Protein backbone atom coordinates (compact mmCIF):
# COMPACT_ATOMS: atom_id res chain seq x y z
CA UNK A 1 0.00 0.00 0.00
CA UNK A 2 1.35 3.40 -0.96
CA UNK A 3 2.07 6.17 1.52
CA UNK A 4 -0.76 8.22 -0.05
CA UNK A 5 -3.23 5.40 0.52
CA UNK A 6 -2.12 5.09 4.14
CA UNK A 7 -2.69 8.84 4.64
CA UNK A 8 -6.19 8.64 3.20
CA UNK A 9 -7.07 5.57 5.24
CA UNK A 10 -5.79 7.28 8.37
CA UNK A 11 -7.88 10.36 7.60
CA UNK A 12 -11.03 8.30 7.11
CA UNK A 13 -10.38 6.34 10.30
CA UNK A 14 -9.83 9.57 12.24
CA UNK A 15 -12.98 11.12 10.75
CA UNK A 16 -15.03 8.09 11.77
CA UNK A 17 -13.47 8.36 15.20
CA UNK A 18 -14.90 11.84 15.62
CA UNK A 19 -11.99 14.06 14.57
CA UNK A 20 -13.35 17.32 13.11
CA UNK A 21 -9.91 18.12 11.73
CA UNK A 22 -9.91 14.90 9.70
CA UNK A 23 -13.41 15.63 8.38
CA UNK A 24 -12.28 19.14 7.43
CA UNK A 25 -9.25 17.82 5.57
CA UNK A 26 -11.35 15.31 3.63
CA UNK A 27 -13.85 17.99 2.58
CA UNK A 28 -10.98 20.28 1.61
CA UNK A 29 -9.71 17.54 -0.71
CA UNK A 30 -13.18 17.47 -2.25
CA UNK A 31 -13.41 21.25 -2.70
CA UNK A 32 -9.92 21.41 -4.18
CA UNK A 33 -10.67 18.56 -6.63
CA UNK A 34 -7.58 16.79 -5.30
CA UNK A 35 -6.01 13.97 -7.35
CA UNK A 36 -6.48 11.87 -4.19
CA UNK A 37 -10.28 12.12 -4.43
CA UNK A 38 -10.60 8.69 -5.98
CA UNK A 39 -8.75 7.18 -3.05
CA UNK A 40 -10.89 9.14 -0.59
CA UNK A 41 -14.14 7.94 -2.12
CA UNK A 42 -12.87 4.37 -2.33
CA UNK A 43 -11.93 4.42 1.37
CA UNK A 44 -15.32 5.89 2.32
CA UNK A 45 -17.35 3.46 0.20
CA UNK A 46 -17.93 0.76 2.86
CA UNK A 47 -19.25 3.35 5.30
CA UNK A 48 -21.73 5.40 3.25
CA UNK A 49 -25.49 5.09 2.76
CA UNK A 50 -26.65 5.52 6.35
CA UNK A 51 -27.08 9.26 6.87
CA UNK A 52 -30.45 10.96 6.40
CA UNK A 53 -29.75 13.89 4.06
CA UNK A 54 -32.08 16.84 4.70
CA UNK A 55 -32.05 19.88 2.42
CA UNK A 56 -33.30 23.31 3.45
CA UNK A 57 -34.16 25.84 0.77
CA UNK A 58 -36.12 29.04 0.43
CA UNK A 59 -35.75 32.70 -0.41
CA UNK A 60 -33.31 34.92 1.51
CA UNK A 61 -34.72 36.12 4.83
CA UNK A 62 -37.02 33.19 5.60
CA UNK A 63 -34.71 31.97 8.35
CA UNK A 64 -32.89 29.00 6.85
CA UNK A 65 -29.81 29.32 9.07
CA UNK A 66 -31.91 29.90 12.19
CA UNK A 67 -34.04 26.86 11.35
CA UNK A 68 -30.94 24.78 10.66
CA UNK A 69 -29.53 25.79 14.04
CA UNK A 70 -32.79 24.89 15.77
CA UNK A 71 -32.96 21.54 13.97
CA UNK A 72 -29.41 20.71 15.05
CA UNK A 73 -30.47 21.33 18.65
CA UNK A 74 -33.48 19.01 18.32
CA UNK A 75 -31.50 16.27 16.58
CA UNK A 76 -28.72 16.41 19.17
CA UNK A 77 -31.31 16.12 21.93
CA UNK A 78 -32.38 12.89 20.22
CA UNK A 79 -28.79 11.64 20.40
CA UNK A 80 -27.93 11.99 16.71
CA UNK A 81 -24.63 13.16 15.25
CA UNK A 82 -25.26 16.01 12.83
CA UNK A 83 -23.23 17.36 9.93
CA UNK A 84 -24.13 20.72 8.37
CA UNK A 85 -23.14 22.01 4.93
CA UNK A 86 -24.05 25.68 4.55
CA UNK A 87 -23.55 26.87 0.97
CA UNK A 88 -22.40 30.48 0.66
CA UNK A 89 -22.94 32.55 -2.51
CA UNK A 90 -19.81 34.61 -2.00
CA UNK A 91 -16.20 34.10 -2.97
CA UNK A 92 -14.43 31.38 -0.98
CA UNK A 93 -12.09 34.14 0.25
CA UNK A 94 -14.77 36.63 1.29
CA UNK A 95 -15.52 35.24 4.74
CA UNK A 96 -19.25 35.78 4.17
CA UNK A 97 -20.39 32.39 5.35
CA UNK A 98 -18.05 32.47 8.33
CA UNK A 99 -19.65 35.67 9.57
CA UNK A 100 -23.19 34.57 8.72
CA UNK A 101 -24.10 30.89 8.95
CA UNK A 102 -21.46 29.96 11.50
CA UNK A 103 -22.30 32.78 13.87
CA UNK A 104 -25.97 31.78 13.78
CA UNK A 105 -24.93 28.21 14.60
CA UNK A 106 -22.31 29.13 17.20
CA UNK A 107 -24.40 27.38 19.88
CA UNK A 108 -22.93 24.10 18.63
CA UNK A 109 -19.32 25.22 18.15
CA UNK A 110 -18.02 23.12 21.06
CA UNK A 111 -20.29 20.11 20.49
CA UNK A 112 -18.22 17.15 19.27
CA UNK A 113 -21.38 15.62 17.81
CA UNK A 114 -21.86 18.50 15.36
CA UNK A 115 -19.72 19.45 12.38
CA UNK A 116 -20.49 22.66 10.46
CA UNK A 117 -18.87 23.52 7.14
CA UNK A 118 -19.43 26.58 4.98
CA UNK A 119 -18.94 25.96 1.27
CA UNK A 120 -18.69 28.55 -1.51
CA UNK A 121 -21.01 28.02 -4.49
CA UNK A 122 -18.27 29.48 -6.75
CA UNK A 123 -20.85 30.51 -9.29
CA UNK A 124 -22.54 27.11 -9.50
CA UNK A 125 -26.27 27.54 -10.12
CA UNK A 126 -29.04 25.71 -8.31
CA UNK A 127 -28.23 26.92 -4.82
CA UNK A 128 -25.45 24.40 -4.16
CA UNK A 129 -21.70 24.11 -4.58
CA UNK A 130 -20.45 21.75 -7.30
CA UNK A 131 -18.68 19.67 -4.63
CA UNK A 132 -21.73 19.26 -2.36
CA UNK A 133 -22.49 15.60 -3.33
CA UNK A 134 -18.97 14.46 -2.44
CA UNK A 135 -18.97 16.54 0.76
CA UNK A 136 -22.19 14.79 1.78
CA UNK A 137 -20.49 11.48 1.10
CA UNK A 138 -17.64 12.48 3.42
CA UNK A 139 -20.02 13.33 6.28
CA UNK A 140 -22.04 10.17 5.67
CA UNK A 141 -18.90 8.04 5.68
CA UNK A 142 -17.64 9.81 8.79
CA UNK A 143 -20.62 8.42 10.67
CA UNK A 144 -23.00 11.36 10.95
CA UNK A 145 -26.60 10.24 11.37
CA UNK A 146 -28.08 13.33 9.71
CA UNK A 147 -26.59 15.72 7.15
CA UNK A 148 -28.31 19.10 6.84
CA UNK A 149 -27.67 20.97 3.58
CA UNK A 150 -28.61 24.65 3.61
CA UNK A 151 -28.77 26.18 0.14
CA UNK A 152 -27.60 29.64 -0.91
CA UNK A 153 -31.02 31.25 -0.77
CA UNK A 154 -31.65 32.67 -4.21
CA UNK A 155 -35.36 31.92 -4.46
CA UNK A 156 -37.05 29.99 -7.23
CA UNK A 157 -33.92 28.65 -8.94
CA UNK A 158 -32.98 26.42 -6.02
CA UNK A 159 -34.47 23.16 -7.22
CA UNK A 160 -31.23 21.16 -7.40
CA UNK A 161 -31.45 20.29 -3.72
CA UNK A 162 -34.45 18.04 -4.43
CA UNK A 163 -32.20 15.70 -6.39
CA UNK A 164 -29.60 15.63 -3.65
CA UNK A 165 -31.60 15.29 -0.43
CA UNK A 166 -33.64 12.42 0.97
CA UNK A 167 -35.99 14.98 2.51
CA UNK A 168 -36.34 18.54 1.20
CA UNK A 169 -37.67 21.30 3.44
CA UNK A 170 -39.00 24.41 1.68
CA UNK A 171 -39.14 27.42 3.98
CA UNK A 172 -41.46 30.40 3.66
CA UNK A 173 -42.23 33.27 6.01
CA UNK A 174 -44.84 36.03 6.34
CA UNK A 175 -43.83 39.50 5.31
CA UNK A 176 -41.68 38.26 2.41
CA UNK A 177 -44.16 39.28 -0.29
CA UNK A 178 -46.64 36.85 -1.78
CA UNK A 179 -46.01 33.51 -0.10
CA UNK A 180 -47.51 31.57 -2.97
CA UNK A 181 -45.43 33.50 -5.50
CA UNK A 182 -42.37 32.24 -3.62
CA UNK A 183 -43.68 28.69 -3.96
CA UNK A 184 -44.07 28.74 -7.74
CA UNK A 185 -41.74 27.77 -10.59
CA UNK A 186 -41.03 24.23 -9.42
CA UNK A 187 -40.91 24.88 -5.68
CA UNK A 188 -44.33 23.26 -5.20
CA UNK A 189 -42.94 20.09 -6.76
CA UNK A 190 -39.69 19.78 -4.82
CA UNK A 191 -40.79 20.08 -1.19
CA UNK A 192 -41.35 17.06 1.04
CA UNK A 193 -42.16 19.25 4.03
CA UNK A 194 -43.20 22.91 3.78
CA UNK A 195 -42.20 25.08 6.70
CA UNK A 196 -43.81 28.40 7.51
CA UNK A 197 -41.21 30.00 9.75
CA UNK A 198 -41.73 33.08 11.94
CA UNK A 199 -45.22 31.77 12.65
CA UNK A 200 -45.54 34.19 15.55
CA UNK A 201 -45.78 37.10 13.09
CA UNK A 202 -48.88 38.54 11.47
CA UNK A 203 -49.76 36.88 8.19
CA UNK A 204 -48.31 33.46 9.01
CA UNK A 205 -51.73 31.80 9.15
CA UNK A 206 -52.57 33.26 5.74
CA UNK A 207 -49.35 31.93 4.18
CA UNK A 208 -49.99 28.50 5.67
CA UNK A 209 -53.59 28.45 4.46
CA UNK A 210 -52.70 29.52 0.92
CA UNK A 211 -49.86 27.04 0.73
CA UNK A 212 -52.09 24.17 1.83
CA UNK A 213 -54.63 25.19 -0.78
CA UNK A 214 -52.01 25.19 -3.55
CA UNK A 215 -50.67 21.80 -2.48
CA UNK A 216 -54.18 20.35 -2.48
CA UNK A 217 -54.57 21.37 -6.13
CA UNK A 218 -51.29 19.71 -7.16
CA UNK A 219 -51.84 16.43 -9.01
CA UNK A 220 -50.17 13.53 -7.22
CA UNK A 221 -50.44 9.80 -8.01
CA UNK A 222 -52.17 7.49 -5.57
CA UNK A 223 -49.88 6.46 -2.75
CA UNK A 224 -47.61 9.45 -3.24
CA UNK A 225 -46.33 11.44 -0.30
CA UNK A 226 -48.57 14.33 0.68
CA UNK A 227 -46.31 17.14 1.89
CA UNK A 228 -47.42 18.60 5.22
CA UNK A 229 -47.25 22.31 6.04
CA UNK A 230 -45.66 22.91 9.44
CA UNK A 231 -45.67 26.28 11.20
CA UNK A 232 -42.72 27.04 13.50
CA UNK A 233 -40.89 29.94 15.09
CA UNK A 234 -37.27 28.80 14.83
CA UNK A 235 -35.87 31.78 16.71
CA UNK A 236 -37.77 30.85 19.85
CA UNK A 237 -37.63 27.10 19.16
CA UNK A 238 -41.44 26.98 19.05
CA UNK A 239 -43.04 23.81 17.59
CA UNK A 240 -39.73 22.37 16.41
CA UNK A 241 -40.99 19.00 17.65
CA UNK A 242 -43.71 19.16 14.98
CA UNK A 243 -41.10 19.71 12.31
CA UNK A 244 -38.89 16.84 13.45
CA UNK A 245 -41.97 14.60 13.63
CA UNK A 246 -42.84 15.48 10.02
CA UNK A 247 -39.26 14.74 8.94
CA UNK A 248 -39.30 11.36 10.70
CA UNK A 249 -42.67 10.54 9.16
CA UNK A 250 -41.29 11.29 5.71
CA UNK A 251 -38.20 9.16 6.35
CA UNK A 252 -40.44 6.25 7.37
CA UNK A 253 -42.51 6.69 4.20
CA UNK A 254 -39.35 6.73 2.10
CA UNK A 255 -38.29 3.39 3.58
CA UNK A 256 -41.72 1.74 3.39
CA UNK A 257 -42.46 2.85 -0.18
CA UNK A 258 -39.03 2.06 -1.62
CA UNK A 259 -38.65 5.69 -2.65
CA UNK A 260 -35.47 6.15 -0.62
CA UNK A 261 -33.63 3.60 -2.75
CA UNK A 262 -34.97 5.18 -5.95
CA UNK A 263 -33.87 8.65 -4.88
CA UNK A 264 -30.40 7.46 -3.95
CA UNK A 265 -29.98 5.63 -7.26
CA UNK A 266 -30.97 8.84 -9.06
CA UNK A 267 -28.54 10.83 -6.92
CA UNK A 268 -25.71 8.38 -7.64
CA UNK A 269 -26.51 8.43 -11.35
CA UNK A 270 -26.27 12.23 -11.46
CA UNK A 271 -23.07 12.16 -9.44
CA UNK A 272 -21.43 9.60 -11.75
CA UNK A 273 -22.58 11.56 -14.81
CA UNK A 274 -21.16 14.82 -13.44
CA UNK A 275 -17.78 13.19 -12.73
CA UNK A 276 -17.69 11.60 -16.19
CA UNK A 277 -18.54 14.91 -17.91
CA UNK A 278 -15.85 16.69 -15.88
CA UNK A 279 -13.32 14.02 -16.89
CA UNK A 280 -14.26 14.43 -20.56
CA UNK A 281 -13.96 18.20 -20.31
CA UNK A 282 -10.50 17.90 -18.78
CA UNK A 283 -9.35 16.04 -21.89
CA UNK A 284 -10.06 18.91 -24.24
CA UNK A 285 -9.39 21.85 -21.96
CA UNK A 286 -5.72 21.58 -20.97
CA UNK A 287 -4.45 25.10 -20.37
CA UNK A 288 -7.28 26.87 -22.15
CA UNK A 289 -8.74 24.23 -24.45
CA UNK A 290 -6.90 24.90 -27.72
CA UNK A 291 -8.59 22.07 -29.63
CA UNK A 292 -12.05 23.18 -28.54
CA UNK A 293 -11.24 26.76 -29.57
CA UNK A 294 -10.15 25.58 -33.03
CA UNK A 295 -13.34 23.59 -33.54
CA UNK A 296 -15.50 26.46 -32.26
CA UNK A 297 -13.80 28.82 -34.71
CA UNK A 298 -14.53 26.39 -37.56
CA UNK A 299 -18.21 26.23 -36.60
CA UNK A 300 -18.44 30.02 -36.34
CA UNK A 301 -16.82 30.37 -39.78
CA UNK A 302 -19.24 27.94 -41.36
CA UNK A 303 -16.48 25.43 -42.05
CA UNK A 304 -18.04 22.82 -39.75
CA UNK A 305 -21.24 22.19 -37.82
CA UNK A 306 -21.65 21.70 -34.03
CA UNK A 307 -22.31 17.95 -34.27
CA UNK A 308 -19.30 17.28 -36.49
CA UNK A 309 -17.16 19.42 -34.20
CA UNK A 310 -18.38 17.53 -31.12
CA UNK A 311 -17.58 14.19 -32.79
CA UNK A 312 -14.10 15.46 -33.62
CA UNK A 313 -13.61 16.63 -30.05
CA UNK A 314 -14.58 13.27 -28.59
CA UNK A 315 -12.86 11.26 -31.29
Image (cartoon, rainbow, N blue to C red):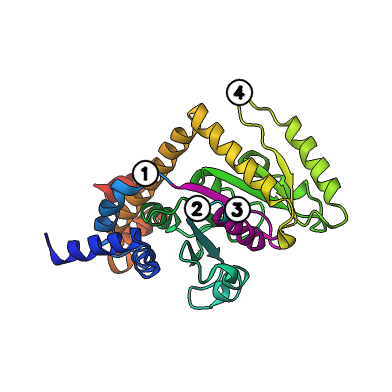
- Residue 56 has which mark? 3
Q: Which image quarter is the N terminus in?
A: bottom left
Residue 275 appears left or right of 113: left
Q: Are marks 4 and 3 in contact (CB under 8 Å)?
A: no
Q: Residue at x 59, y 37 (%)?
A: 250
Q: Residues within 10 Å of mark 3 (few under 14, many from 20)?
A: many
Q: Which residue is mark 1?
A: 307
Residue 310 appears left or right of 112: left
Q: Are marks 4 and 2 in contact (CB under 8 Å)?
A: no
Q: CA distance from mark 4 to mark 3?
A: 24 Å
Look at the image and give the residue range highlighted in magenta: 51-76
The quadrant in which residue 301 appears is bottom left
Q: Residue at x 67, y 36 (%)?
A: 227
Q: Which of the two discs, 4 and 2, sits closer to the camera?
A: 2
Q: Which residue is mark 4?
A: 223
Label 1 vs 4, first from the N-terminus: 4
Q: Is residue 20 magenta?
A: no
Label 1 vs 3, first from the N-terminus: 3
Q: Element type at marker 2?
A: loop
Q: Which residue is mark 2?
A: 80
Q: Nearer the viewer, residue 30 or 233?
A: 233
Amino acid sequence: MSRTNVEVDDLVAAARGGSPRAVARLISLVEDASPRLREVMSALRPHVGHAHVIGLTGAPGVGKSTTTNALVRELRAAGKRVGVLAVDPSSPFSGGALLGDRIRMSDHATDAGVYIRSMASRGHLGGLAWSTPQAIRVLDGAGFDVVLVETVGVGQSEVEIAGLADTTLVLLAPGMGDGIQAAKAGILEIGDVYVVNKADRDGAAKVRRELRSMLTLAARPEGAWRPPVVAIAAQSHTDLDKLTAAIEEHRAWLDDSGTLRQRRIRRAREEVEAIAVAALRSRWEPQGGGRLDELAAAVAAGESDPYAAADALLG
